[in-house]
Amino acid sequence: MIVLHGGGEFSVGCRAMDKRVLELAGGLVVVTALAAEPGGRYRAATDNGVRHLRALGATVAGAPDVREDPAGALSALGAARLVVLPGGSPSRLLTALRTTPVGQLLIDLVAAGGTVMGASAGAMVLGSWTVLPDRPGPSGMAVVEGLGLVDVLVIPHWSGGSSRADWLRAVRQGMPGAVPVLGLPEESGVLVEDGKVTAVGQAPTALVNEERDLPLGETWELQ
C-alpha cells in the first residue's frame, strides 16, 4: 500500500486517517525526513513524526539521516513495515532517494507488501512524475520523473485549480502523456492499493484530469 498525503501532516486533523494507515500497515513504523536539510532540521522533522505516531499507539522509530549515517539509516529502514516521508523540499528528497539506496529500499518494501506514506513533498516524489517548484523549467518550474511507485502526479496543499494555476501550466507543458493528476488537500489524501485509489482524511481528492472530486471513502481505479 502507498499513502499519498496532501500536507499538514502530524496535525490533530490527521489523527483518524493516520490511525487507519497504522492499522492497515501493521508492524514497525520508521520516519525519515529526507525532504529536510541534514542536521538539526532533519532531526526535528523526524522527531515530530515520531511523537505524533507514537501518540497514536504505533511502534515507531526515527531513522538516522542516510546522508550522514548510511549504515544506521539502512538498518533502521530495513526493519520497517511502514516508512513515512514527511514534507519539505521535493528536490532535496528526490535527490536523496536517487543518490542513496533508500529509493530502491522503498520500491522493494512495497513489492514485499509493506507500506510507504509520503506527505506533501513525500507524496509528490512517489509518483511517476513530480513538479519541482524550486527548479526552473520551460513553463516556469521543472516537471521531472519521480520514484514511480504510483503512476500519478501529486499536487499537494490543494484548494482548487486557481490556487495552483502555475503548477497546472507546468504540468500541461512538461509532462508527456495522460498521467492522472491528483490534487490533495491538507490533512487529506489517498490510499493506493492494487491500482485502486481511496480518498481519506478531511476533504475530497481532486481528480484534476477528470475535473471532478473523489468523495471521502470512495474508490477510483487507475487506468
Image (tube, rainbow, N blue to C red):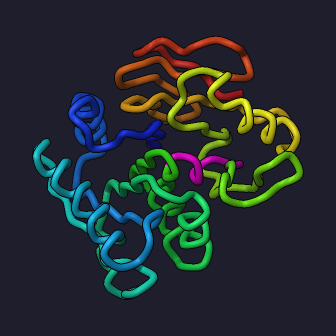
**Closer to the camera in the image, 148 or 66:** 66
What is the quadrant of the C terminus in the image?
Answer: top right
Query: Where on the picture, by quarter, is residue 5?
Result: top left
Quadrant of the snapshot with the N terminus: top left
104 sits to left or right of 34: right
- In the image shown, does 4 or 76 lie closer to the viewer? 4
Is residue 74 in view?
A: no
Image location (x, y in percent) of residue 141: 76, 51
Vertical relation: 16 (above or below) 47:
above
Q: Is residue 127 covered in magenta?
A: yes
> On the image, which quarter does residue 61 sit in?
bottom left
**Image coordinates for residue 221, horizontal then vertical, percent:** 61, 23
Q: Residue 95 in the image: state x and y as whole percent.
A: 61, 71
Give yes or no for residue 126 being in the magenta stretch. Answer: yes
* Residue range corresponding to the magenta coloring: 123-130
Q: Quadrant of residue 134?
A: bottom right
Rendered residue at 78%/39% (across/down): 171
Please tell me how many numbered marks the rendered image carries.
0
- Residue 89 on image: x %, y %: 53, 59
Residue 63 seen from this side: yes
Which residue is pictured at 26% across the width and 32% down the height?
Answer: 20
As displayed, is residue 31 above or below residue 16? below
Residue at point 54%, 29% (across, down): 158
In the foreground, 218 or 204: 204
* Residue that appears at 19% across and 48% down: 52
